[in-house]
Image (cartoon, rainbow, N blue to C red):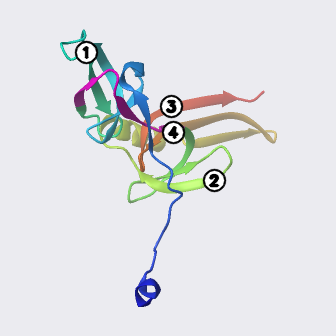
Amino acid sequence: MADIEDTHFETGDSGASETYPMQCSALRKNGFVMLKARPCKIVEMSTSKTGKHGHAKVHLVGIDIFSAKKYEDICPSTHNMDVPFVKREDYQLTDISDDGYLCLMADNGDLREDLKIPEGELGQQLRADFEAGKELLVSWNSGRITSTDVIVCTVLKSCGEECVIAIKTNTALDK
């Protein structure tokens, strides 16, 4: 009984899976699949004819949705492969902290400050657009909003990872 009292659980989860099974032959180009335990977008897919053991083989080439690394796998068409649950959300950029974290606002007004500026070209463009004053510029004319420029960050979430994958600038005019 002493063992039970000494047990301490820091956290718990719902036990929900981060993937679901799908037959290999049902996968499609531009869909998602787990290759080498990484969530990937399928960029190339080819099927070979049935061999002497009766299974057609599917050759998959995918790009990791977070690191952009290329992965390949070959699987019998009748076998199941894991497909990741992928969630895509748009957030409005409100600020960039000194240490490189983004302050993002969801549609419902919730703020999050846990994502870093992405590496490479995307991060450079995001910082340049923000410093150019495109974050949330509101021009008041007789008490009415006349123009707003908003940077929208698209965040992809899968398998416990998240990152900004795209940005766009929306310009809305209110008459």
Identified at 28% across, 14% down, the residue is 46
Q: Secondary structure at mark 4?
A: strand
Q: What residue occupies the far front of the structure in this picture?
A: 53
* Majority SS type along the magenta span: strand
Q: Mark 3 and mark 4: span between their CA atoms?
A: 18 Å
Query: Distance of mark 1 from mark 4, alpha carbons?
Result: 37 Å
Nearer to us of marks 3 and 4 is: 4
- The mark closer to the camera, 2 or 1, is 1
Confirm or deny contact between disc 1 and disc 3 (CB under 8 A): no
Q: Relative to residue 100, is residue 170 drawn left or right? A: right
Mark 3, residues whose alpha carbon is within 10 Å: few (<14), some, or many (≥20)?
Answer: some
Tag 2–tag 1 contact (CB < 8 Å): no
Q: Which mark is residue 54?
A: 1
Q: Secondary structure at mark 3?
A: strand
Query: Label 1 amino acid?
Result: Gly
**Vertical relation: 113 (above or below) 122:** below
Q: Earlier in the sequence, mark 3 or mark 4?
A: 4
- Residue 56, image x and y in percent? 27, 15
Q: Which of pointers 2 and 1 lies earlier in the amino acid sequence?
A: 1
The stretch drawn in magenta includes residue 84: yes
Q: Residue 6 at what x, y percent from top left?
A: 42, 86
Which residue lies under the disc numbered 2? 110
Q: Residue furthest right?
A: 142
Say whether residue 166 is magenta: no
Q: Earlier in the sequence, mark 1 or mark 4?
A: 1
Which residue is identified by label 4?
Answer: 87
Which class describes the residues within 10 Å of circle 1: few (<14), some (14-19), or many (20+)? few
Over which residues does the magenta segment extend?
71-88
Q: Badge 3 is on which residue?
A: 168
Question: Which numbered tag is attached to residue 10?
Answer: none
Whether residues under marks 3 and 2 lie with C-beta atoms below 8 angstroms apart, the answer is no
